[in-house]
Image: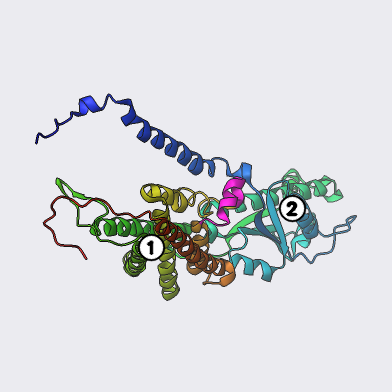
């Protein structure tokens, strides 16, 4: 029996068919990834749509001479009137409601008009003026540094416009015409704008990014561990080759149908997730010192999130076979990252990403992690929705995975392959 002549790379590289599939797939995946990742961040201001921002008017002053409303009402009306055109969802609230929505992560920022605003403006035209009128901008870094920064810029622009409009009113007053040049310059832009943090974060919160990176770790932990289980089980049961360095071997094939294989992989995924969830918290909280006030809840949430992702990966691998890892990579990572709303608010992304954000897992998990880390684990801060979506993810993974494997089994599409001629190793199970 003669052995085949070994081929040389220089000969094989000339075959066009060898290039077609990897070139086409690599190019297509790269193009899609570039559109997904860059398409969501290129121009957030151009895609701004209903970014929630609160405006609070506490002005109790009497209207200036010749005006029907005090300046606080005028500022609030002018701000809310331009909201839709600028892509902002201005929410007119009282102080208690605005502070509650800041604590719940429901608004990206707030603009406060104080009780003495009209009185302070009126005092500028008299000798009794003691301070400039003030509008206060509150930020909410727990919703992400970019989103909070965008809201702050929007509030500051609104406050600056309000100051300019008030300055025009003061410019035609008798007191302004008799004032010295320095006072007239002050009256042209009379309002001082101050920026404060509405919902402070701890020093070890990554300036509001720790929730995003922790969520990313949850998804990666579920994705990687599930694929390791998938490959490890297939290798141990003799359905895939094992190659470590120059050593290659295949175990004797264990007769098992697709459904029972999926059961085994899902059970192992759930078991291993106990370890990954625990070590994830050890690394981030114990070793690195990440701020976290609800650690038991965070561990339970982390475990359930990792399991949900892992079961989803196993279901996709069982349904799609060899390309399952590529499909699950798109489902849990490629499509999930730009639609997570963690770095760029969904309200500042194109409509396609807002559509994905309604069901993509990373968006749901980000809301839950943010609620636990930044918003006192409030259910209305995104935690309740996250739990519901985790439960739905469990159900979808189980139904889809076992529906596909049962279908394959009923059709007789077994995974059995020819046995190797000689395998000195004992059966793995």
Determine whether 168 is above or below 288 in the image: above
Give x and y (percent) for residue 212.
Answer: 46, 57
- Residue 230 visible at all: yes
Q: Residue at x 83, y 45 (%)?
A: 177
**Secondary structure of residue under mark 2:** helix
Query: Where is residue 157 drawn, in percent x and y?
Result: 67, 48
Q: Residues within 10 Å of mark 2 (few under 14, many from 20)?
A: many
Q: Which image quarter holds the C terminus?
A: bottom left
Q: How is the image coloured?
A: rainbow
Please identify the quadrant where the N terminus is shown: top left
Residue labelled with disc 2: 79
Mark 1, residue position:
259
Which callout, 1 or 2, points at the residue further toward the start of the chain?
A: 2
Task: Give the magenta part as a residue range.
Answer: 347-360
- Residue 281 picture quarter: bottom left
Judge from the rendering whether residue 61 lies leftward or rightward of residue 198; answer left or right: right
Q: Nearer the viewer, residue 171 or 18?
A: 18
Quick check: 210 left or right of 237?
A: right
């Amino acid at each position: 029996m003669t052995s085949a002549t070994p081929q040389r790379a220089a000969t094989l590289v000339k075959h066009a068919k060898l290039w077609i599939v990897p070139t086409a797939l690599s190019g297509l995946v790269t193009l899609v990834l570039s559109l997904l990742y860059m398409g969501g961040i290129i121009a957030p201001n151009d895609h701004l749509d209903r970014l929630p921002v609160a405006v609070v008017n506490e002005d109790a002053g009497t209207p200036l001479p010749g005006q029907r409303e005090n300046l606080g009402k005028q500022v609030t009306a002018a701000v809310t009137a331009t909201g839709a055109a600028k892509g902002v969802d201005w929410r007119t609230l009282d102080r208690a409601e605005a502070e509650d929505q800041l604590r719940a992560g429901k608004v990206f920022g707030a603009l406060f008009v104080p009780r003495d605003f009209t009185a302070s403006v009126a005092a500028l035209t008299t000798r009794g003026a003691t301070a400039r009128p003030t509008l206060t901008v509150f930020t909410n870094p727990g919703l992400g540094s970019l989103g909070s920064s965008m809201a702050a810029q929007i509030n500051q622009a609104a406050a600056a416009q309000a100051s300019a409009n008030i300055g025009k009113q003061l410019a035609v007053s008798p007191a302004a015409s008799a004032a010295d040049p320095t006072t007239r310059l002050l009256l042209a832009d009379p309002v001082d704008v101050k920026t404060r943090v509405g919902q402070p974060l701890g020093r070890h919160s990554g300036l509001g990014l720790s929730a995003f990176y922790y969520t990313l770790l949850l998804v990666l932990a579920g994705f990687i561990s599930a694929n390791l289980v998938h490959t490890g089980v297939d290798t141990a049961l003799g359905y895939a080759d094992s190659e470590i360095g120059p050593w290659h071997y295949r175990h004797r094939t264990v007769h098992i149908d697709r459904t029972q294989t999926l059961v085994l992989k899902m059970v192992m995924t759930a078991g291993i997730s106990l370890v990954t969830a625990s070590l994830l918290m050890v690394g981030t909280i114990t070793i690195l010192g990440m701020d976290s006030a609800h650690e038991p809840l965070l561990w339970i949430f982390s475990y359930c999130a990792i399991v949900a992702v892992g079961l989803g990966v196993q279901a996709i691998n069982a349904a799609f076979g060899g390309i399952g890892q590529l499909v699950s990579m798109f489902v849990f990572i490629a499509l999930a990252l730009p639609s997570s709303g963690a770095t760029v608010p969904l309200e500042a992304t194109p409509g396609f990403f807002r559509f994905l954000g309604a069901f993509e897992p990373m968006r749901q998990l980000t809301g839950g992690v943010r609620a636990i880390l930044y918003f006192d684990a409030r259910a209305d801060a995104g935690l309740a929705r996250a739990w519901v979506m985790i439960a739905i993810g469990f159900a979808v993974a189980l139904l889809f995975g076992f529906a596909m494997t049962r279908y394959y089994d009923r059709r007789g599409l077994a995974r059995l392959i020819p046995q190797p001629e000689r395998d000195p190793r004992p059966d793995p199970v």
